[in-house]
Amino acid sequence: MSSSPVELLQALVRIPSVNPDGDPGTDRTGEAAMAAWLKPWLEELGFVVRLEEVQPGRPNLIARAPGSDDRPRILLGPHLDTVSVTGMTIEPFGGVIEDGKIWGRGATDTKGPMAAMLWGLHACRDLLPTLPVAIDFVGFMGEESGQWGSRDFAKNHGADYQFAIVGEPTSLDVVYCTKGSLWATVNAEGKAAHASQPERGDNAIMKLARTLDVMDRELRRELRQFTHPVLGPSTLNIGTITGGTVANIVPDKAAAQLDIRMVSALTDTMPAEAFFAAFLQRHDLPLTVCNVVENPPMEIARDHPWLEKITSIHPASKLVGAPWFSDAAHLSAAGTPSVCVGPGSIDQAHTKDEFIPIADLEAGAEWFTILIQQAADLQLPPPRSSDTPPPGPTR
């Protein structure tokens, strides 16, 4: 058992848990080692812990609070994985303390918020069994790619929970609304030919370039019509483009990866995937689409009892929106109102020299400790019946 939140975070950073999707930059990937380390740590506090494998060797960790199972339940839920360590200029798994900061991959996103949550549970371990609300801890796998962990958890366990606080670096503000995202790969097909006779071929790169130009003008314009008073308009980013093999062959294939960030004004009309497909058809763009991953926007009512409780306990924590998405979106979409809170700044997430100031970490540990201590007077409705379909997200 660590002696301080600083020592706890150092231990977490030193356990590689890099998401294996894409270019992880290390062979020390996956969440299994992190989950295995956390299991006895939480069991020592009295939690009943199980690991649920979502993908081979990649589990969610679900820790149920000590005490009666008849109480309403909430959860504290950071993700277990980190982004790639490729290109980092510091030792990614060092957990070194220097200049009043803890350095390493995940120090901010999101092992710092995880350590703050865990330390709050540790500090309140004698209260947990008798609180009127059971406060569980859930570590999600795969947040940094497809959010498979929170999707699986929401489907199988979401109905058990009244509320969720998802760990992300929010500078201890309360993120109650976020944009959703649509990731997709668009493909253009052409015909190969010798570059000395380009007229005999069909250049897939040029075909793709022309269609991307249409998207840059028209799709951006259409997306801007769907806006939100806090989050602003829906947006488009063209993130990668690939095609061809060598200069003296007319390319027969080209592809680009797109990232659309959308607000609920769009998804209230149709799924973003359907919106994008309709755009391609309406403009007769010669593309095929694959590798589609859609994450919903997230928003809960500002007068939700837990939001009111949080802001009464921590009046300095502002209610804010964020353009990014998180596991909270999938929990909310399945009927568990959720917010994101944690120490550290999103500006440090995914950076080549990631760190969190020790002062921020300690403030986060105190934030969660006080929240748990003052949860004793919270009254919530009884848990939903598991055979009752969960309500949709609050817009």
Image (cartoon, grey):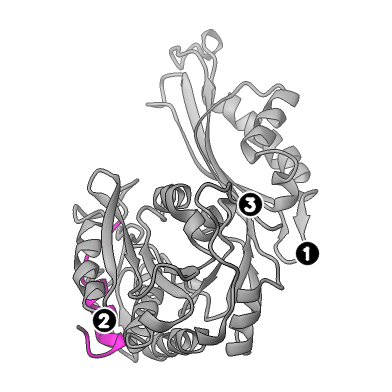
Say which amino acid is labelled 2: Leu
Could you tell whether 321 is left or right of 327 in the image? right
Residue 8 counted in the magenta span: yes
> Can you see residue 368?
yes
Left or right side of 63 for 392: right
Identify the amino acid type marked 3.
Answer: Pro
Q: Earlier in the sequence, mark 1 or mark 2?
A: 2
Q: What residue type is disc 1 on? A: Pro
Give the numbered dot on residue 8.
2
Asked if residue 131 lies in the magenta stretch, the reply is no
Q: Is residue 314 visible?
A: no
For the residue labelled by badge 3, is the local secondary structure a helix, a strand or a loop? loop
Q: Is residue 335 left or right of residue 98?
A: right
Quarter holding the C terminus? bottom right
Please give the residue where the numbered disc 1 appears in the rendered image.
Answer: 229
Question: Which callout, 3 or 1, points at the residue further toward the start of the chain?
Answer: 1
In the rendering, at what x and y percent does residue 285 appear? 67, 24
Front position in the image: 154 or 272: 154
Q: What residue does disc 3 label? A: 391
Few, some or many C-alpha atoms within 10 Å of disc 2 (few <14, some 14-19, many ≥20)? some
Give the number of the mark in front: 1 or 2: 2
Question: Which quadrant of the figure contains the N terminus?
Answer: bottom left
Check the image and name the residue furthest to the top: 200
- Residue 127 image offset from top left, x and y in percent: 38, 87
Disc 2 is placed on an element classified as helix
Residue 54, position as x, y percentages in the image: 32, 46
